[in-house]
Amino acid sequence: MNIIVRTAGGHTVVRPDTTWEKDNEDFYPPEFVNCISASPVLFARISKPGRSVGIRFASRYYDAVNFGVLLYPETPEGLRGEEYAQACCLDHTSFLPTPLFLPITLGEETNEFVLSRDGNRFFSCNGREATTGMIEEAIAEATKMVYIRTGDIVAIELADRQPLTTREKGRTKVNGSWCDNQTIDFSIIF
């Protein structure tokens, strides 16, 4: 199972399954990490395998959606090349929680995804801003390069990475909700 990410810049990268954190366990960054940034994502679970999936047929390849957050360790100069690849592979940095919801929930403007840091909102979007069309475009683009399998996750970054916390802060609480359900609840503990 892989996590196929469509970055905010429009590129496709793949994170290994060791990065997946679905149980909201607290994150303890390794010693060499001093700063963590985050990118909110809309994600979908792949329900059947495929390669070179046309956008017209992409809706047949996923069965459930939710919102999550991807964590990235940062360097003072920002992530480039190999550093970015290394950051994408850091264990337990893809917070893609369960339960998953039917894709129809994305059509409802009243369904809002809210991501908070220490009780302060730092990202939000509603079901009309994050759409099934975004998922289907990501599937079509990703399958030009990679073969998707049942159980893979396709995640679409909804915004550029933003600074989330630093080692000096010590502990940061991250919460997220979708469809009036708390879906994300973990701490980053340096």
Image: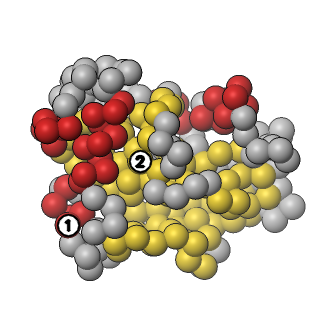
Q: Which residue is mark 2?
A: 156
Q: Is residue 115 above or below residue 190?
A: below
Sequence order check: which comes first, mark 1 or mark 2? Answer: 1
Q: Which residue is mark 1?
A: 107
- At a point 47% along the width and 42% down the height, the residue shown is 10
The kind of residue tagged 2 is Ile
Residue 134: x, y in percent? 31, 50
Residue 137: x, y in percent? 29, 42
Residue 88: x, y in percent? 60, 35
Q: How is the image coloured?
A: secondary structure
The kind of residue tagged 1 is Gly
What label sits on residue 37 in the rendered view? none
Among the 4 quarters of the image, the one containing residue 2: top left
Q: Tag 1: Cα neighbours inside 10 Å, few (<14), some, or many (≥20)? A: some
Among the 4 quarters of the image, the one containing residue 152: top left
- At a point 64% along the width and 74% down the height, the residue shown is 118
- At a point 52% along the width and 58% down the height, the residue shown is 159
**120 relative position to 138: left or right:** right
Q: Is residue 35 above or below residue 81?
A: below
Residue 154: x, y in percent? 36, 39
**174 relative position to 171: left or right:** left
Q: Is residue 47 visible?
A: no
SS type, badge 2 = strand
Q: Are marks 1 and 2 in contact (CB under 8 Å)?
A: no
Q: Tag 2: Cα neighbours inside 10 Å, few (<14), some, or many (≥20)? A: many
Q: CA distance from mark 1 to mark 2?
A: 17 Å
- At a point 72% along the width and 35% down the height, the residue shown is 80
Residue in the foreground of this view, choosing between 105 and 184: 105
Q: Is residue 22 above or below residue 107?
A: above
Q: Is residue 142 visible?
A: yes
